[in-house]
Amino acid sequence: MIIKRPPDIPSSEITPERDYLNRRAFIRDAGVGVAAALIAPAALARSAAAQGQEETPNSYEEATSYNNYYEFGTDKEDPKRYSGSFKPKPWSVKVDGLVKKPGNYSFDDLVKPHKIEDRTYRLRCVEAWSMVIPWQGIPLAAMISRFEPLPSAKYVAFETVTRPSEMPGQSTRVLPWPYVEGLRMDEAMHPLTLMVTGLYGKPLPNQNGAPLRVMSPWKYGFKGCKSIVRISFVERQPPTTWNIVAPHEYGFYANVNPEVDHPRWTQASERRIGEFRRRRTLMFNGYADQVASMYSGMDLVRNY
Ligand SMILES: Nc1nc2c(c(=O)[nH]1)N[C@H]1C(S)=C(S)[C@@H](COP(=O)(O)O)O[C@H]1N2
Ligand SMILES: [Mo]
């Protein structure tokens, strides 16, 4: 059944992530639902059609002009507007920690040995908006394997570049810099996890995290660290930016879960950019078949 809604989204549903202070958590029990999970665009469309929801990729314009990248400002238009003088070339990434092959790798060192793959994924922000974006990149597992992590490496930590002269938001205290994120090793090695190098067949625009950013499509968007300059292999769960600033609102795992509301807004539904009617949010953002087993036995209650 279709429920008609006015085109305006209530402001309670679009509260930005920055308004995190002095809020109290409201947490309720979570259960695990089932949803279809697919990679290929055609299959993605078919799966969505089966649920009565169309899955058309968002336009290049939408994917590159409505962004979260607080290093360039907190408004959705800021990353595009203020990232023009950011230089994603030359680029190098420091690989350190529990690996046999640490070092400083240039962008070409990292990318050239691999075949670039096309992956159209849903992107679901915890602010309850979403897009479908045709990304290009390298399975993170393939890249990581070349560094030969030690068995003692249980987590991977990512760090965004610090360049206040090119990133005006870094001159503010809206977040502690650098932005840091992380994944458990099995999540980082999961075949869905991509080290993104482009979108719509073009090099990754600055506002989307040029030249390298992570994408794990079953997690909320903030897990996808942009403009990565460091990849560290560690034994313990690494600190992550949104969990540092608002631990009662943002967890480490942050798997998309329509049954666990964020303290400030529901996660049961979402607004696909470019659409008016809200969609139901899918468990693990629609990738449950591929990823749910990684969390069996885990308490998903604090999973946002
Ligand atoms: N370094 C850094 N990475 C970041 C962010 C950020 O502010 N800084 N925002 C995150 C959030 S909240 C989201 S939803 C996605 C948005 O990715 P997009 O702008 O490419 O759609 O980037 C994530 N990665
Ligand atoms: Mo987000």
Image: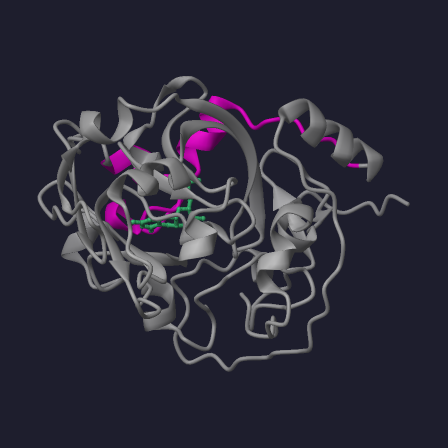
Q: Is 73 one of the magenta-colored residues?
A: yes
Viewer can see residue 10:
no
Count of numbered tags: 0
The residue that appears at 69% across and 65% down in the rendered structure is: 259
Does residue 215 appear to the left or right of 14 in the view shown? left
Quarter of the figure with the N terminus: top right
Please provide percent x and percent y for residue 304.
53, 65
* Whether residue 162 is situated above or below residue 236 in the rendered picture: above
Please provide percent x and percent y for residue 127.
52, 55
Which residue is farthest right?
Answer: 1
Viewer can see residue 230:
yes
The residue that appears at 53% across and 24% down in the rendered structure is: 59
Q: Nearer the viewer, residue 145 or 238?
A: 145
Q: Is 296 one of the magenta-colored residues?
A: no
Which residue is farthest left?
Answer: 165
Which residue is farthest top?
Answer: 201
Q: Nearer the viewer, residue 56 or 214?
A: 214
The residue that appears at 38% across and 69% down in the rendered structure is: 243
The residue that appears at 15% across and 27% down in the rendered structure is: 89
| Residue range highlighted in magenta | 53-82
* Whether residue 196 is situated above or below residue 5 in the rendered picture: above
Please provide percent x and percent y for residue 143.
33, 37
* Whether residue 272 is situated above or below residue 34 in the rendered picture: above
* Whether residue 298 is situated above or below residue 219 in the rendered picture: below
Please provide percent x and percent y for residue 244.
32, 71
Q: Nearer the viewer, residue 182 or 24?
A: 182
